[in-house]
Amino acid sequence: MVDVDRRVFLRQALAAGALFLPVSGMMAGCATAGGGGNEQAKGDVSAKNPLGVDSSAALEVVTFAGGLKTTFPEVQAAYKKAHSGADLSVKGMVNINSLQPRFASADPPDLVDDSGAQKIPLGTLVGGKQLADLGPLLDAPSVDDPNVKVRDTLVDGTVEVGSYNGTFHALNYVLFVYGMWYSRSLFDKHDWEMPEQWDDFLALCEEMKAASLAPVGYAGQNAAQYVTTTLLTMAAKAGGPDVLVKIDNLEPGAWEQPAVGDAAAAIEQLATKGYLLPGAAALEHTEAQTEWVKGKVGVYPNASWVENEMKSATPKGFDMVMSPVPSLSSDDAMPTETLFASPGESFIVPAKADNVRGGMEFLRYMLAKDSAMAFTESTGSLTVVEAANAAVKPKTTGLESTQAALKAAGKNTVTYIHNLWYGDMHKACTQAMADLLTGRKSAEEYVKACQAAADKTAADDSIEKYERK
């Protein structure tokens, strides 16, 4: 099955104009071949250098220049202090998919933030044996306390979301919290409150429409998946977290579960009742979000990166905040406080990088408490470092509301992973959502389209399958 997936990766690489060179396994106890056929960089293992980094080896890091907009200056300084002879390069880019030719020619960067709309499908990279096993990172001593392993500093779910059939391949660094985002000052002006139940939310939408606002915004060109997350959050709240586990595991009829159909019918109401931002189908995400921060839209389903992403366009006094997605009914299986909170922003170390150990070492410093706190203070987004999240003091209304929502949710958080595992299925379901929001598909047709995509994925033996416990 892996050989077939390798051919899939090859086809993608050829389309990008590159040749594929076979990739062998991950970093082992001894040096392995690097990008140009040279030995991978390796230093002596010690208490101060637990991963055995070659302190004189160059390290190339590529970050995603999206909503978070950071190149981790604090981490760069810490890495350079520990490895003063290293030539360190950290650059941001938007089109991560453009790195495919470098993967295919066995000359990838040492660390990549594989995120954004133009990311490389992780399932394809894993199936083609393109990624290093990050298990050594998890078992390495943390920067803050050598007696505590890195894995024991992470929030629940971090290892699960980044693992593929038991192997940890991706560190999802940012704890993204999805919900209904709105202007607190606007809501205060109209004496509105974010409802806990969907029927009450629809009533609020009617009030917002009467106030000459588009009740709900979205971006049809590249971010309809934000509304998919809203739908699946409602489905999980209604039917319990196993609703999403069944979808991730490609179980027969998973998309046809009653909770999913009910949630799809709820989203369909936004379109049929005229509650969506006019013209949203033609907008990119920042264009639609600009309409929102200009005060033309009441509620925007989104995640916690949006505050930093729209910082320069958001007027003073907008007071951006979030609340949980409304429950379908008071009979839901999970409480109203339930949130979709998931580690995201996938950092990967290519198996054929010249400096695999250096890539993991950079991640180890990213997971230091001070580094994680600096990231949150800079971007307004929490990380998967539990101690940092507990210690950081919010400086913005968005972060303050996110922390409050997480505290209220407690253990009642849900997530899904199929979007990371099965790129074509995710793409098909995102298109189905775009069709649902424009009225080209009914709720029933949306469910059928997603189920068809899932069935196609399940039946395709060339696609590596993964299991969520």
Image (tube, grey):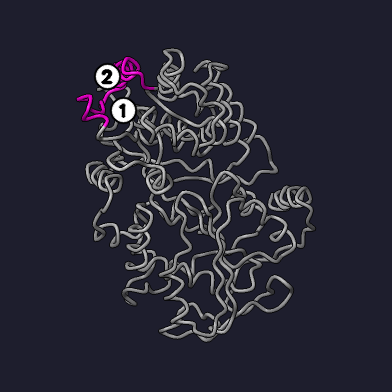
Disc 1 crowd rating (10 Å Cα; few below 14, some 14-19, many 20+) is many
SS category of the residue bearing label 2: helix
Start-end of magenta stretch: 186-213
Chief secondary structure of the magenta span?
Answer: helix
Q: Residue at x 57, y 32 (%)?
A: 221
Q: CA distance from mark 2 to mark 1?
A: 9 Å
User: Which sits in the foreground, 68 or 1?
Assistant: 68
**As shown in the figure, which amino acid type bears the numbered disc 1?**
Pro
**Does the magenta portion include 67?**
no
* In contact (CB < 8 Å): disc 2 and disc 1: yes
Residue depicted at x 60% and y 41%: 423
Q: Which mark is residue 326?
A: 1
Between residues 251 and 226, which one lies in front from this camera angle?
226
How far across and down, in percent of the image, does residue 429 sit? 56, 30
The x and y percentages for residue 166 are 51, 56
Q: Name the residue that disc number 2 marks.
A: 200
Locate residue 206, reporting x and y percent. 32, 15
Circle 2 crowding by C-alpha within 10 Å: few under 14, some 14–19, many from 20: some
- Residue at 46 percent across and 76 percent down: it is 79
